[in-house]
Structure formats: structure tokens, C-alpha cells
């Protein structure tokens, strides 16, 4: 059971008075780029389906203002499904015994990026379960090889929690960006959905360290996690405003039947789109992916996200053989495809929804500007 957005869940309608109040708060968010805690809560407690169109249109306008209808593509390589962490929602956490484990070695990682480069991608996202096999030295070698081979690329890492020193070494070896979702900014909820050896504070410390080192940083959260309530979601919004990340990954929680959280409801499309739209208004320059989890939940989930403010997609360039083993949630899309099929499919989908693909490195907008001004 989750307890978010009650009127959306019940499909209840609002009186004109409440709708007017919600619209004026949405306008205020678009103008001031922030709201007070109780104002966010008012929106989440009261928003109904008849108010969402207004929110979605405003968020779409905010995206067009900075990014027009361009969608940045990033080639995603899923390095390994070995993981020492205990995220109770995740199908590759260390306790799950039902999957075969795999790991890509340096040459295989480079090969995936070579294919991705040929397909036009100029950002590679190297994502993995927390696998101690990938020492700093190993990753430094991979990063340096990629960066010396291709001078016009960006590398995003998404390898979980590491020490300040490790993040610094990887940054110095050529990593440009780091994705580390905070998962939830509510300590209560964090502790409910993670193993007791994991630390809410350490995850935040990692995000602060990454920012301090100079990475373009991506935080993010799941929508609809078991026991999540509107106050928890307000914490996410307040935390994101404070952290001011360059990227924010927002996806629905998708229940995996081999995890400790089996039997819970998954998050829904509308709930997730509402959070994407609010974040677009609050952080108008942020890079916001239309997540694979949304595409898994609903055939047009990612396209819908583009219409409410998302501006990034991450087609998979992992070897086809390993894709279905990176099963963080079940029925994940694109697991049977090759990189070339994914490339064509994504482009067709993006164009069908009135957007165009952008194959530039796609840095955070102010970073691009700084470089141009140098
Ligand atoms: N280990 C790295 C980390 O912790 O950031 C990256 C890999 S982790 C599998 C990537 C993301 O998958 C997580 O941040 C989490 O939000 C998401 N994820 C995992 N299980 C999920 C589920 N059942 N439903 C939705 N998202 C999930």
C-alpha cells in the first residue's frame, strides 16, 4: 500500500475553488522556482486528474524555454549485477538468489561504447550494482582508455556509494557526471526500504562529495515506494531544491516478486508524471530522464514524460545476453534488443511525439554556457 496523491488514486474531482488554488500554486512555483513545505503538501494532498493538464502544460513550457523539443540520448552500459547492497526493492540486491550474476570486463565495456559511438552517442552511462570487483584502478583504466580513444564524449558513472577519494580518482581519470539517486529524502522511508546496514546520511554525504569534486550530479527518487506518503514526497522536493543537482532521475517503484518488498503495489504513471512535472518547474534547467521504469510501467510512459518536462533518454547499449540479468525490476523493456534496434526504436518514438534527438554531449545548460564563455 502507498499513501500518495489520494484524489488521483480515488479518481476524485475538485471543486472550482480548490482547482483555482492549485493552479495559483503551480503558477507561483513556475515563477519563484520554489514553494513552502505546506504549499507543496497542499498540491499533493488535493491535486486531482482535472488539475493535472494545467501542471503538465506549465512544466512542458518550462522545458521548451531552456531545451526546446530536444531529447539528449545517452548510451547505457549495465556493467554488472553483482551487488553488495541491501535495497529491499531491487531485484539485484545481494539477497536475491533467483538470478545468475554477470560482470562485464574492460574490453567488453569498451566494445559496448565503440558500438554506441558508431550509433552516434556521445555520452556513455556506466551503471552497475555495487560490485567490489571494480576497484578504483580498474575503473581508472577503463575511463582513461575511453577518454583517450574518444575526445568528444562525456562519461557518466552510476556505481553507487564510494569514498570521497574514490570519486576524486575517477573524476581525475575522466568521469564527468555521476548518478546517485537519493531514493527518498525521508529518513523513515529510507530505513523502511533499505537494509539496516545502509545509511541515509552516507548517501547524502556521497552526493555532497560528488558536487564538491566537480561532477555534474544526478539525484533522484522512486514514486510509490511502500508506505511512502505525501509528506515524504515533499521532503524529496525540498531536498532537491537544497541540493540543486544537475540531473534528477524520477521513476515509479516497480514491485519485484523476488525481493523482500514483494506483494506491494507499484507506483503509477500519473503519480510519477506529477512529480516529474513539479521537479521541472522547480529546477527548470535540470536534465530529467524519461526513465526506463516509466517505459516498463506503461508502453508510452517515457513519451508521456517528455510531454511533462523530461528531456533525456538512455537507450541500452549493453550486450543483449546480459540485459535480462540486470533485472532491477521485472519485465524490463528492451532486454531482447540489440543496441542498433534500441537506437532506431527510440528515435522513432521521440519523433512520433513531436521531439527531436540531440546527439551532442548534452551537458547541463550552465556548464555549456561557461565553456562557451571561457
Ligand atoms: N548501484 C547504483 C546505485 O545504487 O545508485 C546504481 C544501480 S541501481 C540498480 C539504479 C537505480 O535503480 C536505483 O537508484 C533505484 O532507484 C532503481 N531501482 C532499483 N530497483 C527498483 C525497482 N524495483 N523499481 C524501480 N526502480 C528501482
Image (cartoon, grey):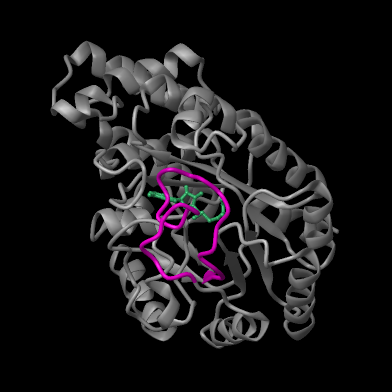
Give 21 or 143, whichever is nearer the viewer: 143
Image coordinates for residue 65, horizontal then vertical, percent:
50, 47
Q: Relative to 108, is 168 on the left or the right?
A: right
Name which residue lies at 23% across and 61% down. Answer: 299
Nearer to the camera, 180 or 63: 180
In this view of the protein, which residue sits in the foreground, 137 or 146? 137
**Residue range (magenta):** 75-101
Q: On the rendered structure, is 344 left or right of 53?
A: right
Residue 322 location (% of width, % of height): 44, 77
Q: Residue at x 26, y 40 (%)?
A: 270
Q: Residue at x 31, y 69 (%)?
A: 349
Left or right: 351 with respect to 220?
A: left
Residue drawn where x is 65% and y is 86% of the image: 107
Residue 180 in the figure: left or right of residue 1: right
On the image, which quarter does residue 169 sit in? Answer: bottom right
Q: Is 46 in the magenta?
A: no
> Does residue 319 sit above or below 308 in this rendering?
below
Q: What is the quadrant of the N terminus in the image?
A: top left
Please check the rendered image and state whether residue 84 is part of the magenta-colored stretch, yes or no. Answer: yes
Query: Which image quadrant: the C terminus?
Result: bottom right
Majority secondary structure of magenta residues: loop
Q: Position of residue 267 (x, y in %)?
A: 29, 41
Report if residue 30 is visible in the image: no
- Residue 117 percent coordinates (x, y): 59, 83
Look at the image and tell me whether residue 87 can be seen: yes
Quadrant of residue 111 in the image?
bottom right
Amino acid at each position: 500500500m502507498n499513501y500518495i496523491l489520494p484524489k488521483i488514486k480515488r479518481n476524485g474531482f475538485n471543486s472550482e475553488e480548490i482547482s483555482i488554488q492549485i493552479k495559483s500554486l503551480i503558477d507561483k512555483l513556475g515563477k519563484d522556482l520554489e514553494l513552502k513545505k505546506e504549499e507543496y503538501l497542499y498540491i499533493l494532498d488535493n491535486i486531482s486528474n482535472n488539475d493535472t493538464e494545467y501542471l503538465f502544460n506549465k512544466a512542458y513550457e518550462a522545458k521548451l524555454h531552456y531545451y526546446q523539443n530536444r531529447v539528449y540520448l545517452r548510451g547505457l552500459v549495465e556493467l554488472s549485477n553483482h551487488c553488495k547492497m541491501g535495497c529491499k526493492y531491487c531485484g539485484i540486491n545481494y539477497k536475491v538468489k533467483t538470478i545468475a550474476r554477470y560482470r562485464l570486463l574492460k574490453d567488453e565495456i569498451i566494445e559496448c561504447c565503440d558500438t554506441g559511438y558508431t550509433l552516434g552517442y556521445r555520452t556513455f552511462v556506466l551503471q552497475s550494482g555495487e560490485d567490489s570487483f571494480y576497484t578504483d584502478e580498474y575503473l581508472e583504466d577503463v575511463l582513461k582508455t575511453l577518454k583517450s580513444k574518444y575526445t568528444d564524449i562525456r562519461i557518466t558513472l552510476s556505481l553507487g556509494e564510494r569514498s570521497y577519494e574514490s570519486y576524486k580518482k575517477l573524476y581525475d581519470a575522466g568521469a564527468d557526471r555521476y548518478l546517485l539517486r537519493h531514493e527518498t529524502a525521508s529518513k523513515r522511508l529510507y530505513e523502511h526500504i533499505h537494509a539496516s546496514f545502509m545509511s541515509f546520511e552516507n548517501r547524502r554525504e556521497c552526493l555532497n562529495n560528488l558536487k564538491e569534486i566537480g561532477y555534474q550530479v544526478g539525484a533522484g527518487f522512486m514514486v510509490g515506494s511502500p508506505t511512502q506518503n505525501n509528506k515524504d514526497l515533499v521532503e524529496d522536493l525540498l531536498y532537491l531544491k537544497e541540493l540543486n543537482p544537475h540531473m534528477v532521475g524520477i521513476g515509479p517503484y516497480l514491485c519485484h516478486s523476488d525481493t523482500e518488498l514483494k506483494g506491494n503495489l507499484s507506483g503509477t504513471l500519473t503519480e510519477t508524471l506529477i512529480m516529474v512535472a513539479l521537479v521541472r518547474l522547480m529546477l527548470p534547467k535540470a536534465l530529467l530522464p524519461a526513465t526506463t521504469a516509466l517505459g516498463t510501467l506503461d508502453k508510452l510512459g517515457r513519451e508521456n514524460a517528455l510531454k511533462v518536462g523530461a528531456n533525456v533518454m538512455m537507450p541500452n547499449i549493453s550486450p543483449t545476453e546480459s540485459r535480462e540479468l540486470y533485472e532491477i525490476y521485472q519485465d524490463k523493456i528492451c532486454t531482447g534488443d540489440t543496441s542498433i534496434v534500441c537506437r532506431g526504436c527510440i528515435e522513432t518514438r521521440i519523433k512520433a511525439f513531436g521531439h527531436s534527438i540531440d546527439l551532442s554531449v548534452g551537458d547541463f545548460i550552465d556548464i555549456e554556457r561557461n565553456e562557451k564563455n571561457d
